[in-house]
Amino acid sequence: MSDAMPRPVHLGKVVDGLAENPALPSAFIRRLFGYRKGFGTVAKRTDLTGDMIAEIIATDDHWLIHSLALNGGLPRVFRMMLAEHPDPAIRRAVAVAADGAPRELFERLAKDADPQVREYVAQSDHVPADLRALLAKDPAPEVRAALAQWWTTAPEPVRRLLLTDPDDSVRAGACATYSPRGPHPVPPADLVPALLADPVTRAGAVRHCALGTATARRLAGDPDDDVRAELAGHPDLPPALPDELARDPNPCVAVRVFARQDTPEPTRAAIHAQIRYEAPPPTPRANHQNHQDQLNLLDLDEEAHEREFMVELARSELRTLRLPWVTADPLPYVDSTYVCFRVSAAMSDRLPPPLVARLLADEESSVRTTMALHAREHVDPDTAERIDRTYRPFKRVRWRPADDFPLPVEVLRRLATDCDPRMRQLATRDPDLPVGSVRSLAADPDPDAAVRRAAAAHPRLPAADVTRLLADPSEFVAAAAAANPNLPTTAMHHILALADL
């Protein structure tokens, strides 16, 4: 092996990265068809020729063919061929990647012997409506349930079939509190009484029912938390019930009362304080007096953990709550003490410039970011940089404000030496970043390696630096370097040789 190329620490990841390299010579692509330690990444390339595809199929290697079936650029003739493959996992992959496929492929997949293949067909909006409707009578309830959950705009005859299906899971999917696709379906009015009487569809039917006092009282005592939560959000809730539901054992029910426009402020404040600041109950320590004492303590332990989980779930709902009635009339809520109210106000497109500026400078990241996305004309480069620098998402997500508000070249170049690695990472978005800066970022000391990973993919990173990064301690950096078109063919050859290819 050449002295110029240290041995990769993560050879498998390097091989996978090399499989994605757009500059990989065709002879090297074919060598990768013999690799059996990965998931067949090379088969997802968009530049595979017909001969290469036929060669991959001839290998009879599961992961290579599975990846090929997921290749969205696969020619029609090969899609049809793989739709007849004896391995159902391969046919499932064909169904997953069937967007834009011809009708004849969907006809084949909709009749597949494997129910999971048909499930994927049921979930796809690319299937012709007449073929998709046939799945409402599929013999497998899991297929019908998938159709019920995913085809929210199905014609009424299809919705009726699903809402009256003999299988609980199908009816539950057809009348749920949440749908993976919008818009939320509205059941036919004549079916609502039966759906409300059915335990598996009751929660989903509450929002659609005409709510009399007797019905409301009955639902308020329902053992299903989801039923009581849906009741708490019903616009026709009788006046006596909000206070009762605000004290519900499940704090997620109280969140729905908090979100109501007609909730008195003292009640709203009490709910917010209870959920936001409730301390988890103390966990009892086990003693060894007797077996029954230990069992009692275990029961208490389980109850405490369940309560802690419910409170945390309610806190999450409070953080992500978006209130259309606040967005429709935002002015009274711009200075609300509740973050979700300020976020909802920031979703308005009708705020005057002074209030837009105030929300762009809000102490909460979610408020600033939301306001920026709804008032783009007010976001100058300084504001865009500040919002990205202080962006603090509730959970790990790949998106960041700079994705929607690209920073000017002069800002990106300044950020190459920023003290914050998150901001240094942005510098690599300048395709013409000076080579010296790119090299410096490729040697960045940040332990998270995100800066080096971004630099490893940069088009101006010299070949010697790309080669060096193949041995980076981070597998993600090494894979990014292997995928860089600047990688010399000699290094490509060495990688393949190390993998016995």
Image: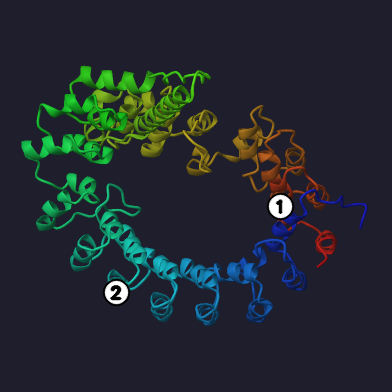
Q: How is the image coloured?
A: rainbow
Q: Earlier in the sequence, mark 2 or mark 1?
A: 2
Residue 431 vs 315, above or below: the answer is: below
Residue 201 vs 76, above or below: the answer is: above
Q: Which residue lies at the image location 52% right of the left edge and 28% below the top edge?
A: 390
Q: Which residue lies at the image location 50% right of the left edge and 31% below the top edge?
A: 391
- Of circles 2 and 1, the one toward us is 2
Quadrant of the rendered image containing residue 417: top right
The C terminus lies in quadrant: bottom right
Confirm whether residue 125 shows in the render.
no
Which sits in the foreground, 426 or 400? 400
Give me the disc on residue 479: 1
Q: Position of residue 70 (x, y in %)?
A: 54, 67
Look at the numbered discs 2 and 1 and tell me whether their residues touch, using CB distance below 8 Å.
no
The N terminus lies in quadrant: bottom right
Report whether 433 appears left or right of 312. Answer: right
Name the residue beneath numbered marker 2.
134
Task: Indicate the secondary structure of the residue bearing disc 1.
Answer: helix
Q: Which residue lies at the image location 31% right of the left edge and 32% below the top edge?
A: 252
Q: Position of residue 13 (x, y in %)?
A: 72, 54
Q: Amino acid at mark 1?
A: Ala
Q: Amino acid at mark 2?
A: Leu
Confirm whether residue 405 shows in the render.
yes
Report whether 121 appears left or right of 384. Answer: left
Which sits in the foreground, 308 or 408? 308
Quadrant of the rendered image containing residue 203: top left
Give the CA separation, mark 2 to mark 1.
45 Å
Report whether 379 appears left or right of 318. Answer: right
Q: Position of residue 32 (x, y in %)?
A: 74, 68
Residues packed near mark 2 inside 10 Å, few (<14), some (14 to 19) or many (20 plus): some
